[in-house]
Amino acid sequence: MLSNTLMKEVIMKTVKFALRARAATPSVFSAVPEEFTISDGDGLHHYIKVGGFNERIVTSGTIDGAQVTLTGDFFQDITYSMPVQIAGQRFIALDRYPKAVYNGLLNSVGKKLSNFLPTLVWNNPGAFIPRPERSYLLRPKAGARGMGFINLNTGKSIQYVLQTLALHASKSPEDYLQALAETGIVLSDEGMNDTHDLVATVNTGYDVVEFIPNVTAEYRIMTDYTGQPVLVVERTRTMTKAGFHQARGCGQSVDKAVPFKDWEPSGDAGTIKAQLVDFFTTLARPVNSFDLFITEQGEWGFFEACSEFGSTSLPDGWLAMQARQLVHHTATCCL
C-alpha cells in the first residue's frame, strides 16, 4: 500500500465551452471535439461543449452556461488572437480576415525584419494604376486552392478584364468560362472541384497583387495554439493555365511536413529561421497557415495567410490536438 506522502488526489475540473459557428469559420473550430479531457500540472480538466451561438454582442454573464468561448468574429470588427476575459467569461476570437487585410498585417510586422519582401495588394482594382515595369495578378478576394487567378501580364488592361467579367456574369458557369476563353482571359483552375466552384470564386471579386519574380521555394508554415511556428510543409510549384508558377495547398504529401525546429529552408537557413521566430512572436496568430516564399536573392515574405485552411497535408491528428489545446489554453493561461 502506498503511503499518504506518495498518494496524490487527482482533481477533475469541469469546464463548459462554446463555439461561435459561421460560414467562414477558422479551421481549428471544426476540429474541436464535443467532449475531451486534458491533464496538466494542476490535474485533469474535463471540457464539455454546450453549443454554438450566433450573437455578435456579448452581454454580461455566460452563454449557455459556457465559461470559455471560441468565436469567429468579435463585436464585428475586433479580433483577439490571445485570450481575453470579459464579464467573468474567457474568450478567444480568431476571425478570418479578408486576404488584403491579412497581407497588410503581415507586411506591417515583417517590414521591421531584414530581407523581408512585402506582397503588395490593392483591394480596389477598378481604381488601380499599374506601373509599366511591374507585373500583376488579379487574386480572388475569397479564393482557395489557387483558383481564379488572372495573369495581367498579357497585354490586356485591368479595366478590360473587369468589364469582361461583369459583362458575362449572368451566364451559366459553363457559358461564362467559355466567353472568357474567347476573349483571351484565362483563369487558373488547377484546384477547382467543378465549374460552379471556380465561378463562385471569381464572383467574390478581385484584389490586385504585385507579381513576385525569382521565387525558388515555397512553404506552408503552421502555428500552434500559442501562435508559434511548429510545422512546415514544403510546397511544389507548378505552371498554371494562367501562365505563372504557383504552389497550392491541396495535393501536397503529408511526408513533406516537418517540425519547424528541424526545418532547413533554402538560402541562408539560420538567418531566415531567426527572422521567422521574431515575426511569429510579434504577430501571435494561433493555428493559422502562412504561405512563405523565398527568392533567389534570399528575400522572404508571405503570399497570404489564413485561419481557414486545408488539412490534407498535415499529420494525422495534428489539427485536433491543436484544437483541444486552444480551448485549454484559453481556459487556463494567464491574462
Image (cartoon, rainbow, N blue to C red):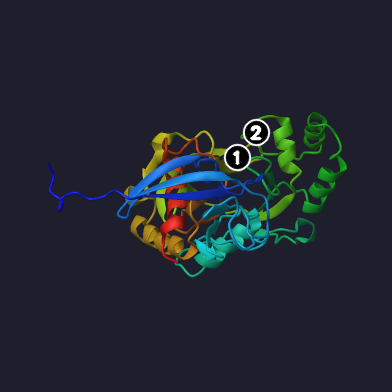
Which residue is denoted by mark 2 in the rendering? 192
Cα–Cα gap, marks 1 and 2:
7 Å
Q: Position of residue 182 (x, y in %)?
A: 81, 34
Which residue is denoted by mark 1 in the rendering? 145
Q: Position of residue 14 (x, y in %)?
A: 43, 49
Q: Position of residue 150 (x, y in %)?
A: 70, 45
Q: Quadrant of residue 321?
A: top left
In this picture, is 181 found above or below 77? Answer: above
Asked if the residues shown at circle 1 and circle 2 are in contact, with their CB atoms under 8 angstroms apart, the answer is: yes
Of label 1 and label 2, which has the lower sequence position? 1
Q: Residue at x 81, y 53 (%)?
A: 159
Answer whether residue 227 is visible to the viewer in this image: no
In this picture, is 10 found above or below 241? Answer: below
Quarter placement of the N terminus: top left
Answer whether residue 255 is visible to the viewer in this image: yes
Q: Looking at the picture, tell me which residue is in the foreground, 172 or 125.
A: 172
Label 2 sits on a secondary structure element that is: loop
